[in-house]
Image (spheres, helix red, strand yellow):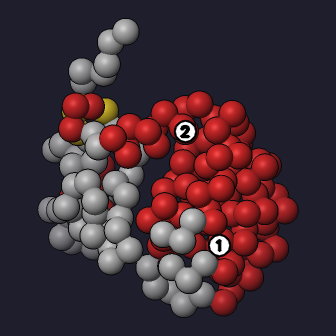
Amino acid sequence: GSFPTENVLPPAPIRDSDGSSSSSGEPENAATEELLDGAGSAGSLAPAYQPARSRLFRPYDEWTLAETAADALGRIGAASTEEVTAMLDDADPVIRRRGAEILARIGPDAETAVEPLLRVAEQDPDPAVRKAAIYALGQIGPNAAAAVPALMQILRDSPNSP
């Protein structure tokens, strides 16, 4: 078998609980900052769609083992959902967030994770973990329809901050 040799998009870098990246050292909003570089005027969005080379794209051989495992679990899909869902109960917020990110990658096939993700989205003490769980519910799509009322409540109750 061969490994990808072109620049590929690895899973999102896993952030430590203090917000720092455990893989790239980039600030959490580095991609947004890069996309907006040069778009200084409010009326010009064109540069946002023409980044030179996004820092999100790295050669496969630069991926961490955790990124590679997360990618594999996401690609395995439904067969990994039960074990990945168990990550949502880990004491470490980095592991909980990683679990939610993998479930997001699995997408609609992670339907059995909707209730645990909803619990995390509503109750986790770490805002980054809650955001990852909410994103995962969106990636599950129509199979997560049961989450709509709770997500609407989160939308109403949350301040307009990251």
Three-letter amino acid code of the residue under disc 2: Gly
In the rendered image, the quadrant that contains the N terminus is: top left
Question: Which of pointers 1 and 2 lies earlier in the amino acid sequence?
Answer: 2
Q: Position of residue 32 (x, y in %)?
A: 30, 62
Residue 123 sits in quarter:
bottom right
Query: Can residue 69 be seen?
Result: yes
Q: Residues within 10 Å of mark 1 (few under 14, many from 20)?
A: many
Instruction: Give me the residue at 65% from left, 71% from top.
Output: 120
Q: Secondary structure at mark 1?
A: helix
Instruction: Give me the residue at 74% from left, 82% from top.
Output: 153
Q: Position of residue 142 (x, y in %)?
A: 78, 50
Q: Position of residue 112 (x, y in %)?
A: 78, 49
Q: Secondary structure at mark 2?
A: helix
Q: Which residue is mark 1?
A: 121
Instruction: Give me the residue at 72% from left, 72% from top.
Output: 119
Closer to the camera, 102 or 45? 102
Q: Residue furthest front?
A: 91
Closer to the camera, 57 or 67? 67
Residue 155 sits in quarter:
bottom right
Q: Which residue is mark 2?
A: 74
Q: Position of residue 20 (x, y in %)?
A: 27, 70
Instruction: Give me the residue at 61% from left, 41% from top.
Output: 106
Closer to the camera, 141 or 79? 79
Query: Can residue 142 be seen?
Result: no
In the rendered image, the quadrant that contains the C terminus is: bottom left
Above or below: residue 58 compared with residue 23: above
In the picture, measured across the screen, residue 141 lies left or right of residue 43, that is right
Q: Residues within 10 Å of mark 2 (few under 14, many from 20)?
A: many
Three-letter amino acid code of the residue under disc 1: Ala
Closer to the camera, 7 or 2? 2
